[in-house]
Amino acid sequence: MDGQDNDNAIPCVSTYFFSIFAILPESVISMIDYIIVGAGFAGSVLAERLASQNNKKILIIEKRKHIAGNCYDHYDEQGVLVHKYGPHIFHTDNAEVFNYLGGFTSWLNYQHEVLALVDGQKIPIPFNLNSLEQLFSPSLASSLEKKLVERYGFDVKVPILELRKEEDKELKYLADYIYRKIFANYTAKQWGCTPEEIDPEVTARVPVFISRDNRYFQDKYQAVPKHGYTQLFANLLDNDNIKLLLNTDYKDVLSFDSKTGDITFFGQPFSGKLVYTGMIDELFDWRFGELPYRSLQFDFEHFKQMSFQQATTENYPDNYDFTRITEFKHMTRQEISGTTIVREFPQDYDRSDVGKNIPYYPMLKDENRQCYKQYYELSQKFDHLILVGRLAEYRYYDMDDIVARALEVYQEHFVT
Ligand code: FAD
Ligand code: UDP
């Protein structure tokens, strides 16, 4: 079941709704300085900067019927604030990013904690010294803890693939146990491959943590927008210089000639810059082949009870086809009698299948990076084309990364 939209809850943003069959007069097109494809963080932050700092006229083309990209949240039919494309927790050490976004939202302090069902027990994830004590006998746990601290120090994060290189017999036993119980099946579900077959940066996101800190992240700033992500985006885009064309695939209104770099918009030449935050392979008509992505299916369920589970997110590394269950009200602290959860079912991305055609994650592997590099090199031929975002750069950006990247791109390309 999809998250039910309640359109009353979507904040209002000034929009132009053009019929996609209309031919725009040249005079209107010449009023647009920049066209941005995609209203996620990459597109919206650049639009905000260009509109507010450079007084430029921006048109954002977004194929979904809403702003906010994958960060979009809304109130479901039962009135629970849910994240339509999976749980989003803001965390960063970057004060500039946190303060910049703070200009568009108040924050609700929120320290994310995750549990995982392992051997019938719910243990803290990342696996830490508390997890160790829950799963092993006191004598074994204390011997393993001593060895870990002696070998790596306290408050240190060790990627599982590093820990598995251990030669010490006991530590090797522990590494193999964590690998088997927490990483192997979860990664098989999430990525369709083993932890070794995906870039080590992926599993290193959830390291073994030699600590008693049960939080998922240790960043200085951890929060969710007090009035939700969509409201944050509505505030970013609330500028008379920004117009939105929602519910429109850019390909229906704009064409980019990858030989000449010419842009045609509603049948007319467009001479401004194009900021593109969609899939880079799509922009170049998949000429070097399709970049693989991983998709997800979200299964929302509402319960007429105060709470469903102990933690905001509970991982199922072993049992079941889904990877995790998130209960939103633990994070948003919404005071409401019912509760809504979401289960995440990973699947291959397939652009021709409506149930699988949202590219959530780039598949970070060497051969895919090589393919991306060909697209990137081609894109560099065009000064008026700016590629930024998780899909356009084929990167595993968190929200703070992409906001930082968009601010950097703004400085590089638009500040003289
Ligand atoms: P997007 O948000 O994907 O925006 C791109 C936009 O371009 C989309 O709205 C798309 O519809 C539009 N578009 C694409 N193609 C076209 C086209 N042809 N025509 C018109 N429009 C088009 N980050 C965190 O920091 N914390 C988290 O807890 C977290 N949780 C996540 C959970 C999941 C399940 C996923 C998938 C990601 C999560 N992220 C999290 C990452 C976060 O979603 C991204 O960092 C962020 O959304 C990237 O912004 P973006 O603008 O690059 O991409
Ligand atoms: N992972 C795992 N078991 C877990 C949690 C994470 O194997 O219980 C691995 C898995 O490969 C996952 C990666 O670590 O894709 C990164 O996890 P994270 O929670 O950062 O993923 P995201 O929230 O981005 O989906």
Image: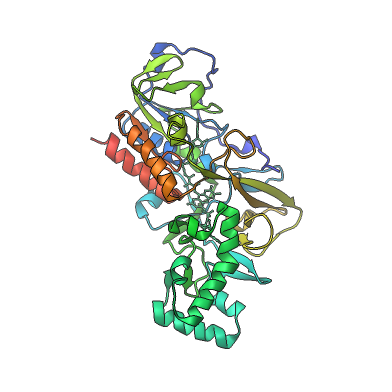
Q: Residue 11: image x %, image y %?
A: 56, 36
In this view, 137 is above or below 175: below
Which residue is pictured at 48% across the width and 62% down the height? 217
Q: Give the side of residue 84 with respect to residue 23, left or right.
A: right
* Residue that appears at 56% across and 85% down: 140
**Spot occupied by residue 156 in the image (x, y as percentages of width and height):** 41, 72
Can the viewer see residue 153 in this picture? Answer: no
Q: Residue furthest left?
A: 416
Left or right placement of residue 169 versus residue 151 in this view: right
| x 29%, y 30%: residue | 383
Q: Nearer the viewer, residue 89 or 226?
A: 89
Quadrant assignment for the N terminus: top right
Is 7 drawn above or below residue 398 in the view shown?
Answer: above
Q: Is residue 219 visible?
A: yes
Position above or below: 239 against 291: above
What kind of colouring is applied to the model shown? Answer: rainbow
358 or 48: nearer the viewer: 358
Residue in the foreground of this view, choosing between 408 and 331: 408
Pinpoint residue 407: horizontal percent, then vertical percent.
35, 43
Between 61 and 191, the one lying in front of the other is 191
The quarter of the image holding the C terminus is: top left
Q: Position of residue 111 (x, y in %)?
A: 52, 62
Looking at the image, the residue that sits furthest to the bottom is: 139
**Residue at figure coordinates x 50%, y 42% from the top left:** 292
The part of the image, by quadrant, that contains residue 200 is bottom left
Q: How many marks?
A: 0
